Amino acid sequence: MIPNINYGNLKESYLFYNIAQKTKAYLEAHPGTHLYRMGIGDVSLPLCDAVIQKLHEAVEDQAHKTTFHGYMPECGDPSLRKTIAAYYQKRGVILSEDEVFVSSGASDELGDILDLFGKEKTVLIMEPAYPAYVDANVIAGNTIIHIPAGEENGFVPMPDPDVSADIIYICSPNNPTGAVFDREALQAWVDYANKKDALILFDAAYEAFIEEEEIPHSIFEIQGARTCAIEICSLSKTAGFTGTRCGYTVIPKELIRAGMSLNQMWVRNRTTKTNGVSYIIQKGASAVFSEEGQKQIQDYIQIYKKNGAYLMEVLNRLGIWYCGGKNAPYIWMKCPNGMGSWEFFDYLLSEIQVVGTPGEGFGACGEGYFRFSTFGSPEDTKEAARRLEILLRKIL
């Protein structure tokens, strides 16, 4: 047997595994302690009523011969694909339904989409970065160019005309930093990609958290994007589907490379490698885009935004630099007094039982920074913010 030796180039352990091990050890040493978990970006609110109702209907459909559904179309239920295209049209983005592909979630799709590009590609990844971007390309054997970001550019780096790549990852609103790319910044990246004949993988998993009108929700709001971009989105953070698993990918028909249509290539890929997302899940997903579903998920998003406000108010009072929070469910703060990010993690855990995410886990540019997720319960987040302020006032 010849294994994929690229696995040997992966880091020894995953960021969130290390966090889990540290918190496990702390709880074993301090049994019964309540931890205020603001590390992993999992949601804490249940699926909204409109989705639950459709899921129940779909389960009942499966109990009767006349309404039973077996295999679904590999690229997605046509009615759901049409519904998602209509969702984009509300923001002035015109898509045909066969440019929309229903997926089992953004994480799965971000790994699978590399099938389109062949071997030994050069990839630009903005750092700090969601670890899966890096790991998926290490496994694929691609060459990774890390684009550093920092306070000097608000963690929104711009293209370097002297650097060339085949694939560019952009996440906006960004995980982990919460930074957003405005229209001018995205236009610069689209122009760069078209000039270099590169392809942008645009991760829009957090687009529902954008509240500023001037911030694009989709790369396809930008002129020229249809010839250089694929957009991957998720219902996990939009509508609480982290345990339900559904998302969608947009591949325009104008996306042609070496005379081949990436849209048609993805149809071929999906019909070869999947049997489609389940009927029950897709029926539940359809409710997300209904008028009632949109109202209910926005109510939930406002709860998460209020969580962010608790933390931002504390950081503002203390004069600590941060970004994110306003248009994203993550707050990216500078560690106080020059602390390292894992040092700050241990400090918060031991002193106030608050769990966040060390910035170093997102790449070297994340050292000295720390990520808080706003997806926890309001009660826990408010108490964590209170504890954080008391603790940091002692050392600042």
Image (cartoon, helix red, strand yellow):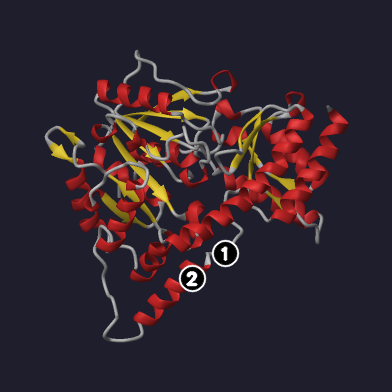
Residue 220 relative to residue 133: left or right: left
Badge 2 vs badge 1, beta-carbon distance below 8 Å: yes
Residue pushed farthest left? Answer: 259
Residue 311 relative to residue 140: left or right: right
Labels 2 and 1: the sequence-earlier one = 1
Tell me the crowding category of disc 2: few under 14, some 14 to 19, or many 20 or more residues within 10 angstroms, Cα based.
Answer: some
**Tag 1: amino acid:** Pro
Placement of 235 over or under 147, stated as above or below = below
Helix, strand or loop under label 2: helix
**Tag 2: amino acid:** Ile
Helix, strand or loop under label 1: loop
The answer to whether residue 112 of the structure is visible from this angle is no
Tell me residue 73's x, y (percent).
24, 64
Dot label at residue 46: 1
- In front of the other: 353 or 4: 353
- In front of the other: 262 or 82: 82
